[in-house]
Image (cartoon, coloured by chain):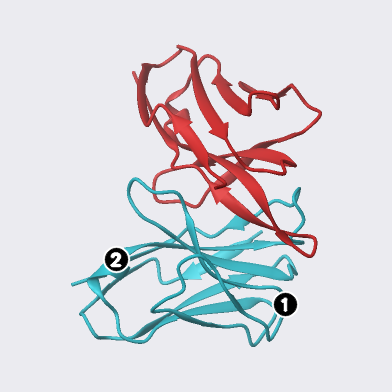
């Protein structure tokens, strides 16, 4: 069964500290993985996409990694800010036939950055 | 710069009432989706559309109906609301259904059925 598992479920860190969020997936065949950020009361917004051949990609203070062999991805946030408080959702497309994909969502990690 | 817009943002229904959620996108995307998000669960696909005039069932379609009469609009209907349909509903759209395509989400509709 295609699954996306995220850990931890929630995380509280002090402003200015770093943190790492984890995503394990069992989707096959694998094409890519996206990290979305969902602010409270808003819809998810894409942060970055990791394709099969990419190991590391940075977007400002966010750095995503991918290990396709172990089927793991991480999202590292550097020098956290209060505005980083949000849920971070790992999403992997699942092939559904005829060139189409459906998205498999993780349950998300709720990050709280406190002053 | 609207992207995907959902109306209403909040709604309280009594059991058995009906309502329609409206989703509009201005990106000329072919594909549109309705998801529900419940505590402790990932987003789950209710219905989707691959183009004007087409709809298809997703993972959790029971109790919902949809229509896509215009390319830019995707409506989600609840004919007889049940407490189990209390959730946050998200509409999304994408240019393609390829694996690399990005889904753009609306801001959500929080529905409570009492």
Chain assignment, label 2: B
- Other-residue count near label 1 (Cα within 10 Å), few / some / many at <14 / 14–19 / ≥20: some
Q: Which mark is residue A86?
A: none
Residue at position x 74%, y 22% from top?
A: A55
- Name the spot of residue B20 as percent of width and height, x first: 42, 82
Secondary structure under the numbered disc 2 in the rendered image: loop
Q: Which mark is residue B86?
A: 2
Chain coloured red in this rendering: A
- Other-residue count near label 2 (Cα within 10 Å), few / some / many at <14 / 14–19 / ≥20: some
- Name the spot of residue A101 as percent of width and height, x first: 70, 57
Foreground residue among B95 and A59: B95
Chain assignment, label 1: B
Where B29 sits versus A94, above or below?
Answer: below
Residue at position x 36%, y 83% from top?
A: B19
Image quadrant of residue B4? bottom right
Residue at position x 51%, y 25% from top?
A: A22
Foreground residue among B77 and A51: A51
Chain coloured cyan in this rendering: B
């Amino acid at each position: 069964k295609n699954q996306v598992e995220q850990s931890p479920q929630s995380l509280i860190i002090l402003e200015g500290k770093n943190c790492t969020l984890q995503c394990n997936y069992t989707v096959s065949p694998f094409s890519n993985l996206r990290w979305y950020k969902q602010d409270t009361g808003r819809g998810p917004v894409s942060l970055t996409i990791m394709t099969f051949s990419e190991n590391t990609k940075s977007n400002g203070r966010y750095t995503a990694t991918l290990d396709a062999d172990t089927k793991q991805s991480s999202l590292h946030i550097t020098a956290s800010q209060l505005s980083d408080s949000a849920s971070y959702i790992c999403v992997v497309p699942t092939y559904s036939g005829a060139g189409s994909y459906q998205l498999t969502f993780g349950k998300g990690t709720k990050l709280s950055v406190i002053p | 710069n609207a992207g995907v817009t959902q109306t209403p943002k909040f709604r309280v229904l009594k059991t058995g009432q009906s309502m329609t959620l409206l989703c509009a996108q201005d990106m000329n995307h072919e594909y549109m989706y309705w998801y529900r998000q419940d505590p402790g669960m990932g987003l789950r696909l209710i219905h989707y559309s691959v183009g004007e005039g087409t709809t298809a069932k997703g993972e959790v379609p029971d109790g919902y109906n949809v229509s896509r009469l215009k390319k830019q609009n995707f409506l989600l209907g609840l004919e007889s609301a049940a407490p189990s349909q209390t959730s946050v509903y998200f509409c999304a759209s994408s240019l393609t259904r390829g694996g690399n395509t990005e889904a753009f989400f609306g801001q959500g509709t929080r529905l409570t059925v009492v």
